[in-house]
Every structure is written in C-alpha cells, then in structure tokens.
C-alpha cells in the first residue's frame, strides 16, 4: 500500500472501528496505530515519545499517529526502511 491516500483511509478505518473504546481509555492522549497489524503500538502525551516507542517496538512497520478525541492533530510517520 504505497498510495498515501489509501494509507490514510486504512488508518482512519482502524481508528473508527475502535473509536468508542479508545476514546474512553485514551482521550487526549497521542496514539500510534500500526497500520500493518491494525492496532495501537504506542500511547503517550508527546509525539516524540510515541513515535520513538512505536519504531522501537515494531521496526519496519507503518504508523498513523493522532490525538484521541475530537481534535485529532493527525500526523503520519514513515519508516525510511519500509519497502
């Protein structure tokens, strides 16, 4: 899945599938969604910490990072080594 639009759509579908649960548990936190595995890989208060933790846990995977709740402040992280 190299098309950024398809990547974003898949990440948003994963979030929407878990939205109710995640918003109860992690509202206001930043999460990294592992788009290759369809789950959360990292949770925290700071983008830098969340992205570093996600890359350490699952090198080579693709992540979609957003704030949980109504103001998502969405960002996409790409691993340079991902083929």
Image: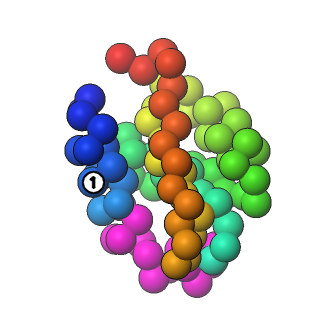
> The magenta stretch spans which residues?
14-26
Residue in view at x 52 percent, y 78 percent: 70
Residue plotted at (51% across, 56% down):
74
Visible in this render: residue 40? no
In the rendered view, does 46 fall on the left or right side of 21? right
Compared with 12, 42 (above or below) is above
Q: Which residue is mark 1?
A: 9
**Is 22 on the left-hand or right-hand side of 17?**
right
Question: Residue 82 appears in which quarter of the rendering?
Answer: top left
Q: Where in the figure is residue 5, as x and y percent of width and height?
A: 26, 44
Which of the pair 8/56 is nearer the observer?
Answer: 8
Q: Is residue 65 above or below residue 12?
A: above
Majority secondary structure in the magenta region: helix
| Residue 62, percent from left and from top | 44, 36
What is the secondary structure assignment of the residue under circle 1?
helix
Q: Does residue 35 show up magenta in the picture?
A: no
Q: Position of residue 46 (x, y in %)?
A: 75, 53
Residue 21 seen in this snapshot: yes
């Amino acid at each position: 899945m190299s098309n950024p639009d398809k990547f974003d759509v898949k990440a948003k579908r994963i979030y929407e599938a878990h939205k109710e649960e995640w918003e109860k548990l992690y509202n206001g936190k930043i999460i990294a969604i592992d788009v290759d595995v369809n789950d959360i890989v990292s949770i925290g208060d700071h983008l830098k910490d969340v992205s570093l933790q996600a890359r350490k846990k699952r090198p080579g995977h693709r992540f979609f990072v957003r704030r949980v709740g109504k103001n998502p402040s969405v960002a996409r992280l790409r691993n340079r080594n991902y083929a």
